[in-house]
Amino acid sequence: MRCLALDMGSTWTKAAYLDDAQVIRESRLPIPSPLLVGGERYEVDATAYFDQVLALLKGLDAPDAEGLLISTQMHGCILTDEDFRPVTPYISWRDGLGRKHLAEIIRRLGKEAAQPSGVLMKANLALCALLGRGIEGERLPQGARFCTLGGYLIGRLTGEHVCHMTNAAPSGLADICNGGWNHPLIRAAGLDSLRFPRIVTGLEPVGKWGGVAVYADWGDQQACAAGASLTPEKTLHISVGTAGLMGVLTNAWEVGAWENRPWLTPGMYLRTVSGLPGGRHMAGLEALLRAAVRDISGQEPAAGAVWEYLKHPQEAGQARDLWDILSRPAPQMLGAYYAAFADAYAKAAACLGFLPENVAFSGGAVSRNPALRQSVCQALGCTARAGEYDVWRGMLRLMEQIHEQS
């Protein structure tokens, strides 16, 4: 089986051409720049997003591809017309209007309103983003189609209005246990004039793009975790992308200081803690060190040198170039920073109700940083699983499952 695969992340849009065992080709582009609308909004031109995706997929030159697999960042949404032409931009999970009006939204709907979606009532839900716009006097278009980011892409490619539960639930508007939308909440929120997609809970295709079978959009956390072949209630999956989160696979739906995120097939959940330190924090540290070297020495560090240093700070004493400037204080400083980073994950893991035996890491900020991984594992008292469990490895594993089902 050969497939096209797409990962629409918060920083990069990535595409790959996969066969049963490996990545044949891949390419990536930075996501389209956010629209300059000012204030708390974080919106991206949805048409530009689609054009970017189409260019990446066609550029892979894969005439024998049988399927298209899609993984996307979660929580955001797009409203479209009947023909999937966008009537709003893509409203990202990084949008701030939900945060600005969260207290009012909770007052109207209740703190537990999003619980059937398996999520806490939090600012980055599409529910809160849409209500925040309504509170500010913006009228939502009547009869518009509600689309997840991947669902919008599927609509443009196939004409089908559909999304996977792993992306429906993070909107805050789904009912996971019933396998559909939370219509009482949708009515209470005043969003019942919108048209919601059919929800898919398994791994079946949902439409055709030319001769290619298109599969429903999977949440990026689940797609990455699939590659780690998690042992339920034993393996802790830590994903450090733009933001950080952790999850343990379980068949138990329980309410607590976590989210019950749906798995790729019904009956299992990723018990998840989100909002943890992520790639944004590491990028800030990289900028700090780069500025320190530049200001002290008057020279710009070589491209990639700072990140290499962050991966192996204990080797700083061996430096014979600009790193001599930082060779004494920096390793201690980074050690303290990594310890604080790891402590945040250890405290979150203690809330999950399980004692994990090992950790599977995904996300570039941690997968390629052995010093950071070591700090996290030491704080958790766990061992690290070998390998980098990235989204392509997850897609390859899902291809195996699709083949086994056919």
Image: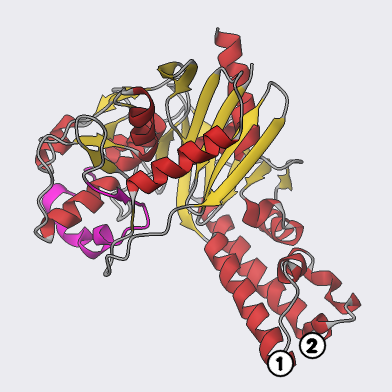
Q: CA distance from mark 2 to mark 1?
A: 8 Å
Rendered image: mark on residue 325: 2
Q: Position of residue 258 (x, y in %)?
A: 42, 46
The quarter of the rendered structure image containing the C terminus is top right
Question: Which residues lie in the magenta part?
Answer: 88-113
| Along the viewing direction, whichever of 356 and 307 lies nearer the viewer | 307
| Along the viewing direction, whichever of 185 and 364 lies nearer the viewer | 364
Tell me the residue that label 1 is attached to. 296
Which residue shows up at 84% across the image and 84% down it? Answer: 324
Q: Secondary structure at mark 1?
A: helix
Q: Position of residue 326 (x, y in %)?
A: 77, 84
Is disc 2 in contact with disc 1, using a CB cutoff of under 8 Å? yes
Which residue shows up at 47% across the image and 52% down it? Answer: 31
Q: Is residue 6 left or right of residue 61?
A: left
| Residue type, label 1 | Ile
Select label 2 or label 1 by which is in front.
1
Q: Is residue 27 left or right of residue 127?
A: right
Q: How crowded is the residue under tag 2: few (<14 C-alpha within 10 Å), some, or many (20+)?
A: some
Q: Is residue 75 left or right of residue 367?
A: left
Which residue shows up at 74% across the image and 80% down it? Answer: 330
Q: Is residue 36 above or below residue 145?
A: below
Q: Is residue 311 above or below residue 145?
A: below
93 in magenta: yes
Q: Is residue 328 left or right of residue 115?
A: right
